[in-house]
Image: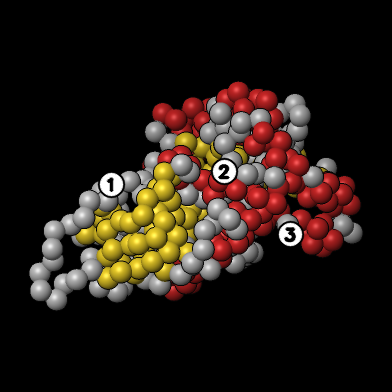
Amino acid sequence: MSERARLHIKGRVLVGPEDVRDELWVVDGHITYERPGAPGAGAEPTVLTGWVLPGLVDAHCHVGLDAHGPVDDSTSEKQALTDREAGALLLRDAGSPSDTRWIDERDDLPRIIRAGRHIARTRRYIRNYAHEIEPGDLAAYVRREARRGDGWVKLVGDWIDREEGDLTSCWPRWAIEEAIAAAHEEGARVTAHCFAEDSLTDLVEAGIDCIEHATGLTEETIPLFAERGVAIVPTLVNIATFPTLAAGGEAKFPRWAAHMRELHARRYQTVRSAYEAGIPVFTGTDAGGSLAHGLVGQEVAELVQAGIPVLDALSAATWGARNWLGRPALSEGAPADFVIYETDPRADVRVLEAPRHVVLRGCVVR
């Protein structure tokens, strides 16, 4: 970690969608908009210039996980550093079997909000990822993960049923209701992996707080999400892999393969319709399974491609996402976690993929 020093940031500071300022300072690792007193001899602030955004948010990733299951601490460190280099300084870890609490002691690594370990139905998810249980145990496991996590629990809402040869719901309605009530009693919010259509109504009516992927949203369920204020994290960079997945499984599960292609084909329309209905949309990449970390800038560009206005797509990764997760952005006194770009990200979000500087806890780490 580089030495923490006073910083003076000049340029355009995007404090909020409509709040743009000319400069900020960093003193003792925190943001201030009031010019600090003169430093002592030889302690002039370091000046950085450019367009400033709050540290980006990847609201669906997996530190401590790869395609085969849990990884060692060295690999987890590399994953977190990759996110940091991409400007993702706040991560919602949407399920991991690894203990990554040691990262909290590292000032040079992003902050992580953990959802504990995935909770899935027996033999209905990726091997070595989840607690695999039956419905009668769901509420108890949710309580356990709520106490281990940072205010979130992650369910696997649907997955391929080998007998059906397609995606089906994993849980009966009564089990979902018990589980979500248990999480809320523990002060945790609940999210669920859902690709298909069938599980969504039960999950939302049972009080779920968020749905990951949400490719199965339809004209019938979108109004329900909007009415209940249930957020979605579309992970479009992950949905882009559906055709490849379908091709790999088509010989054994042709119905599932066709379904995956259909969900992929309508992905942009699904996200656009959700946004237009007023459903909160946030950025997430699903990094850490089969996808690399550091893709949050690409995910913002995907939201724009789907038809979300640029300012709202930026908010999905910055101001809005941080507010949703209960973390500050660029407010007075907030921790100095921000990213500086050469050009205005409102003009072209692709600049997010090339940060000029990354400041974490008041230190210039890039």
Query: Dot 1: within a 10 Å radius of its alpha carbon, few (fewer than 14), some, or many (20 or more) residues?
Result: some
Residue named by callout 1: 332
* Residue 123 position within the rendered picture, expressed as x and y whole percent measured from the top left: 67, 50
Circle 2: residue type: Asp
The answer to whether residue 330 is seen in the rendering is yes
Residue named by callout 2: 312
In this view, the residue in front, 4 or 243, is 4
Q: Is residue 52 left or right of 164 when viewed as pictured?
A: left
Circle 3: residue type: Thr
- The single residue placed furthest to the bottom in the displayed view is 42
* Residue 23 position within the rendered picture, expressed as x and y whole percent measured from the top left: 33, 56
* Kind of element beneath mark 3: loop
Q: Nearer the viewer, mark 3 or mark 1?
A: 1
Mark 3 and mark 1 lie on one chain; the one further toward the N terminus is: 3
Mark 3 and mark 2 lie on one chain; the one further toward the N terminus is: 3
- Whether the residues at callouts 2 and 1 have beta carbons within 8 Å, the answer is no
Question: Distance between the Cα atoms at labels 3 and 1?
Answer: 41 Å
Quadrant location of residue 66?
bottom right
Residue named by callout 3: 241
Quadrant including the C terminus: bottom left
